Image (spheres, grey):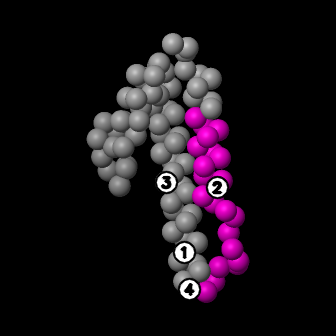
Amino acid sequence: VLALRPWEEGPGAAVAADLVTAGLGPDEARAAATGVLYLVLGYAFDEDQRAHAQALGVAAGPGPDSAVILDQAVALVTAGLRVTAPPD
């Protein structure tokens, strides 16, 4: 769905705009917003596939505590963005 609409109409554009307001350049902001978006979409896709596999009885066992891992990953990206953004 994201590939079928212009960047300006997608959810990443609003995140990128906030990052520009926070001091990142437009290219950095777009890259950061895209990265976070892909991280969250990848998480959602993995959770969906795991649920389907479990419903079909073909899951190899419990998966990692992916919600905790996602929180850690977003925290790491956020920490990196704080380092990248110029000070106020």
Could you tell me residue 62's position as x and y percent?
A: 69, 74
Category of crowding for the residue at label 2, using alpha-carbon neighbours closer than 10 angstroms: few (below 14), some (14–19), many (at least 20): few
CA gap, disc 3 and disc 1 = 15 Å
Residue 41's tag is 3
Would residue 6 be seen by someone viewing this image from the given angle? no
Q: Are marks 3 and 1 in contact (CB under 8 Å)?
A: no
Residue 68's tag is 2
Q: Quadrant of residue 85?
A: top right
Q: Can you say which quadrant of the picture contains the N terminus?
A: bottom left
Residue 3's tag is none
Could you tell me residue 77's position as x and y percent?
A: 60, 37
Counting residues from the start of the chain, the first of labels 1 and 4 encountered is 1
Identify the residue at horizontal 31%, vertical 36% (top origin): 8
Which residue carries the number 4 mark? 56
Look at the image and give the residue range highlighted in magenta.
57-78
Residue with the most extreme front position: 88
Would residue 38 be seen by someone viewing this image from the given angle? yes
